[in-house]
Image (cartoon, rainbow, N blue to C red):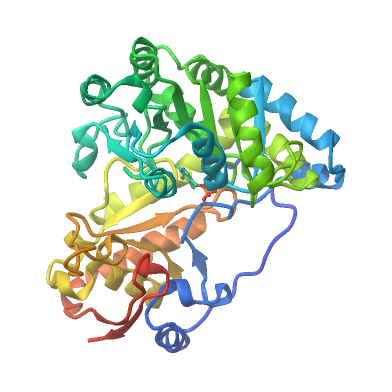
Amino acid sequence: MKLPYAEPYKIKATEAIRTSTREEREQWLKEAHYNLFNLRSEQVTIDLLTDSGTGSMSDKQWAAVMCGDESYAGASSYFRLKETIQRIFGMPYFLPTHQGRAAENVIFSALLKAGDIVPGNSHFDTTKGHIEFRKCHAIDCTIDAAADTQLEIPFKGEMDLDKLEKVFQSYPKEQIPCTVLTITNNTAGGQPVSMRNIRETAELCRRYEIPLLIDSARFAENAYFIKTREEGYADKSIKEIVAEIYSYADIMTISAKKDGVVNMGGFVAMRDADLLRRATSFCIMNEGFVTYGGMSGRDMDALAVGLDENTEYEQLHARIHQVQLLGELLDEYGIPYQRPAGGHAIFLDAKKILPNLPKEQYVAQTLSCELYLEAGIRGTEIGTLLADRDPETRENRYPKLELLRLAIPRRVYTDNHIRVIAAACRNIFERRDEITSGYRITFEAPILRHFTVELEKL
Ligand SMILES: *Cc1c(COP(=O)(O)O)cnc(C)c1O
């Protein structure tokens, strides 16, 4: 008999999960005004709100925490992280920041001026925020196929090179301070970018003399997809693939809360010493002195170990296997989600699951409440609440898709938890005809309403 698959780790410390009754959850959800962000974490059984900063560190990372050097300047923790970044990414210079958006703040302060154009493949929302805050424009050059939820292609997060070249031809190079390539493409559902597309994007950037910045939150998951899906990479190690990816980049920003498998942290790294000088002032002003920036010494040590561990195939396989297992179970039960399963999350297609619900009643939000009531599972609405209102008319901007994102934290839940999630989805799917009413908003903030919105049941 072929031995079944098992995780490449065993568990040394556990954290109790509080279970609850449906009556308790009904009460708590009502008190939370039907907004899952308002729940206390003890009221949640399986928390799939995000995979950011929610991963579980290894014993080696915890051991590294004890070795942290908290010196203000020149801490040995900084040099250990610097050595790791040089070895894994080949980037000679870096500045530590407290998370990914802080890295964006530091580098965009040095690079962007009002009126600039920053093309990319679906800029992440904080990236777009930092670009637009500086009165610059983010132009989306993602391939059209990314918008088709049922299309199964291996690299659905790619840059459309024709769209990118059109942008390069439409503006002088002085107005395009960089191109942002996000791997994996978070906004398109954690979909990867092939090495070929990374290389060709870099070649095009080089031809037009525009620096390439890789937004690297899930770089290791992207490398896993290159190894398992792209011809010519099956026999290469994840570290070899990562080294090739970054040989094409001039700058990288990273939220270490994802593939760094730490609870907080990030950095910006680059090849150009002059750019480092300019960025350094913004790091010192907004984050901290160059050898710690936004991180304590112990956090830098935990990150150095996390980067090394999470660029090993077995670690990535264990993680992506869980996301794929959830996708396979949903397939078995006939439940529609955005295909193929991405690297860090499954996106349930709420409109297809609850076809009888009018869009005015918040379809994905209704599904997220149902999943919480069913099994205490917390996902994130990626639908009308998130899309918010038109800034001029103040009317709802109904998006094409109503999705419920189920993000899987790294090394936190077991396959049994995944089976519970799939079964809960199935129970809702089986009684979908009974779900005929949703919610109405009773309070909404002027911007970013989804975090604090209050609703009532119709
Ligand atoms: C999370 C993320 C960011 C921002 O990082 P934070 O650590 O949340 O500030 C930027 N880009 C991508 C692709 C991300 O997933």
In this rendering, is residue 395 above or below 79?
below
- The residue furthest front is 114
Task: Give the residue drawn at x 27%, y 43%.
Answer: 339
Using the image as rendered, state which of residue 253 and residue 289 is in the foreground. Answer: 289
Q: Position of residue 119 (x, y in %)?
A: 32, 32
Q: Position of residue 104 (x, y in %)?
A: 51, 41
Task: Give the residue drawn at x 28%, y 36%.
Answer: 139
Q: Position of residue 159 (x, y in %)?
A: 30, 27
In this rendering, is residue 206 above or below 153?
above
In this rendering, is residue 408 above or below 324?
below
Give the position of the C terminus as an image quadrant: bottom left
Using the image as rendered, state which of residue 291 and residue 372 is in the foreground. Answer: 291
Using the image as rendered, state which of residue 127 and residue 234 is in the foreground. Answer: 127
Q: Is residue 117 visible?
A: yes
Q: Tell me: 153 left or right of 84.
A: left
Q: Tell me: 165 left or right of 110.
A: left
User: Residue 267's quadrant in the figure?
Assistant: top right
User: Residue 385's quadrant in the figure?
Assistant: bottom left
Q: Position of residue 59 (x, y in %)?
A: 76, 45
Task: Give the residue drawn at x 65%, y 34%.
Answer: 280
Task: Give the residue drawn at x 51%, y 81%.
Answer: 20
In this rendering, is residue 22 above or below 264?
below
Using the image as rendered, state which of residue 351 and residue 317 is in the foreground. Answer: 351
Q: Is residue 1 visible?
A: no
Count of numbered labels shown in the rendering: 0
Q: Tell me: 288 left or right of 352.
A: right
